[in-house]
Amino acid sequence: MHENRETSRVPAEQAGRSAKAQSHNADMHALEESDRCVVPVKQPNKEGQPLAEAVEGRRRPKENDAQSNTSPTQSGERVSQGLSGVRRVARERKQEQFTALLHHVTISLLWESFEALKKNAAPGVDGVTWHEYETGLEDRLNDLHSRVHRGAYRAQPSRRVYIPKADGRQRPLGIAALEDKIVQQAVVTVLNEIYETDFRGFSYGFRPGRDPHQALDALNAGVQKRRVNWVLDADIKGFFDHVSHEWLLKFLGHRVADDRMLRLIQKWMKAGVSEDGTWSETTVGTPQGAVVSPLLANVYLHYVFDLWVEVWREKVGQGDMIVVRYADDLVAGFQHQADAERFLRDFVNRLAKFGLEVHPEKTRLGVSVGKESRKHSRFLGSRTIVGGTQKVTL
């Protein structure tokens, strides 16, 4: 048991799950073990080191928090000594639950989070812009820090706007109020120290130091190095709109046992949306456009898909298999037709358990036989031709 400010624990009921996931004699029920905190056996891709994010120079607001001292990571990113300890424990103890995380949301971290925001972004329901909030910044952040830690902070509803999609439809976005963006960015910084040690190498979406080009390169490399004759290009229909709050909190609870941190996340989930001045409740989903949404989405799919697919490949698949996921868009490649077809059926059933479904128009299983054949995959909005020794993005 760690000292209170770095507290983490291993629940007794989680003991031995890793061993069960690795047992080759377990029956098909093992495929459901990834609903809990399973640590599957294979990690196909190496996880990259997060890259530094530039922060403009400015005098930091004063604070007396002893945890505010920072040290550079290998990438040059400034991380508090306390957060470095969180990452170390998270990396070394995969079953740990962290019971004291909110104290890492310091005034210094709020300052860095403010600086990391887009300075010309549209305002939320508060109507406050980045430049307006900058006036009297020190006093504002001191007050915000106090409200967060006293439990007096209140999340505001997201302002709903729409942007056009390629198919002519409208994509809803939720623009958070400025203080909500600041606190969300700070929470993401803290939780990344845990989840960047957990997330799988084939997950590329909205992660530090990773981008779509790397996902496409990984896909191409996998096709070239493995015996891939069948390609599944899958998209989850309306994913951000159908994230179950109940399941999300269960998944977060595998690692986060700080009730104050969990209540903070719940405030954002329950804040609702404001459209043309009318407020509406949100009982499901996480707003696209919110600072915290990409991390929450990755946590959700880490348990719904990533851990599950590793167990599936180990216990069900008969031939070579590759997988690359970028948020709710993924590609899986298979050596055998039977594996590809069974995986698609099992994947559909897996999603249904969590209130999700594949997009029927964007999900395709490419039928291709022979090394010289080419498979067409529209991954990340690009048409990628894979097969032989060629890769062309149109």
Image (tube, rainbow, N blue to C red):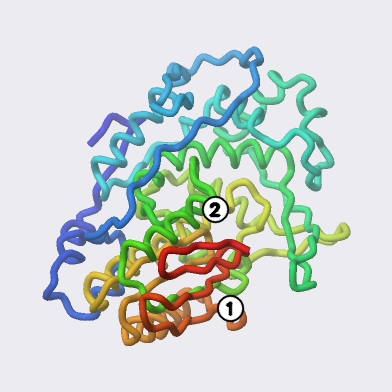
- 390 to the left or right of 98: right
Residue 256: x and y, percent?
40, 48
Q: Is residue 375 above or below residue 44?
A: below
* Picture disc at residue 359: 1
Q: Is residue 52 left or right of residue 100?
A: right
Report which quarter residue 184 is drawn in. Answer: top right
Q: Residue at x 23, y 70 (%)?
A: 314
Mark 2 touches mark 1? (CB < 8 Å): no
Question: Which residue type carries mark 1?
Answer: His
Q: Disc 2 marks which residue?
A: 212
- Mark 2 neighbour density, 10 Å: few (under 14) some (14–19) many (20 or more): some
Estimate the x, y position of residue 102 in percent, counting from the top left.
Answer: 47, 36
Q: Which mark is residue 62?
A: none
> Number of numbered discs present?
2
Q: Secondary structure at mark 1?
A: loop
The amino acid at mark 2 is: Pro
Q: Residue at x 74, y 65 (%)?
A: 171
In the drawing, does residue 193 fall left or right of residue 123?
left
At x 80%, y 58%, the residue is 161
In this rendering, would 294 be left or right of 41?
Answer: right
Please provide percent x and percent y for residue 332.
Answer: 41, 70
Say which label, 2 or 1, has the lower sequence index.
Answer: 2
Q: Which quarter of the figure is the C terminus placed in?
A: bottom right
Horizontal and vertical percent for residue 177?
Answer: 74, 43
